[in-house]
Amino acid sequence: MALQQELEEVKKYLLKEITGSITPEEKIKLQEWADAAEEHQAFIEQILSEEFLTQAVLDRNERKQQEEWQKLYYKIGYVRPLTTSFRKWIAVAAMICLLLGSGFYLLNRETLIHSGCSKAFLQTVDSTYILNGEVLNYARYILDLPPAQNRTQLSAAPDRKIIVPRGGEYKIQMEDGTFIHLGPESSLSIPADFSCHNRRLAMSGEAYFVVHKDSLHPFHIHSTDVDIVVRGTEINVEAYPDERETQITLVNGKAELRTPQGISQELPTGHMGIISAGEGEEVKIAAANIAECTAWHHNRWIFEDRPIHQIVKKLARWYDMDVSFTDVAARDFHITMNMDKYETFNKLAQTIRKMNELQIQIKKNNTIIISENKINHK
């Protein structure tokens, strides 16, 4: 029997197994197929597992879920009243149809790698607090902290630090009206006396700032290689300690870059300032691809003709993955892509595989191995 025909038969049997309408003869056939190979049994176990069940959600919109479930009822002839538990099973059944119908071959038991999400914690001198929600009103939150950490200590207190781990992002609304979007594996150090009149903070990692304009009180952003003075602007700062370059992209407004060596340079709108670690005091200015540099802030991934090793290094922080390459050709393969940031990495990998240039293996524990497609290059 051809593979596609096998899968169609198994799909029908699984749907009937889930809905309780499978006949004894069909159950025997399903069991025979499962016994024929270990990967067949693994496939069935995966589909019927609790883990797969909890992931098999068609749409977050409840009304849309109801419509899709109802369509499936008519298709399989199910007429009993809808129950909560059966809704979940039908979601699994519908997911089987979607996955097998689109040619997604689950027999390889590929680990599903979900996107990052909103998560962070606040670290003070004596405590660590988990931050809930998607946007933190910083001033209000600080006032609600225990007395030892509230504003009564001001300059005597050390900086408070908001830390976003790998696989996370977080948004903060500051007292002066400034909005900050922190990327994965990033941190923001905020002095205890931060206010509308003292607008200084430090950061590591990546952050997008929408700075409230105040000509009398410039906003200062400090990183290891540069101090940035902004006066009402939108600016993206990428300053990861493990990267060779710090990149500052000015979307609009005014910004001045000051190096530790005392060099000061204005950054034109629509341009990027690049400071290379260990290369003296030079600040390189270049025209910026604003859409690409700020895509992560707008919930997308955009890369234009970039080597995949640069792309996956950025994605690894968001998807919390470990990525390795088996050859130089794979590392240097260039890709252009524009994708929803909240899609699974599996979907992205599936798109790249269609180019027939790279092989992407997704292993357990979010381990990714990328190699050149040798068959295509013979």
Image (cartoon, rainbow, N blue to C red):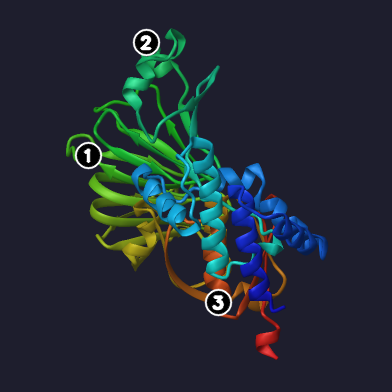
- Which sits earlier in the primary sequence, circle 3 or circle 1? 1
Q: Which of the 4 image quarters holds residue 2?
A: bottom right
Residue 29 placed where, x, y %? 75, 62
Residue placed most toward the observer, 290 or 231: 290
Residue placed most toward the observer, 62 or 200: 62
Task: Give the residue at mark 2.
Answer: 152
Residue 95 placed where, x, y %? 53, 56
**Depicted 14 relative to depicted 53: above or below:** below
Task: Give the residue at mark 1.
Answer: 212
**Depicted 342 relative to depicted 198: above or below:** below
Q: Nearer the viewer, mark 3 or mark 1?
A: 3
The secondary structure type at the circle numbered 2 is loop
Residue placed most toward the observer, 10 or 208: 10
Task: Give the residue at mark 3.
Answer: 354
Q: Amino acid at mark 2?
A: Thr
The extreme left residue here reads 215
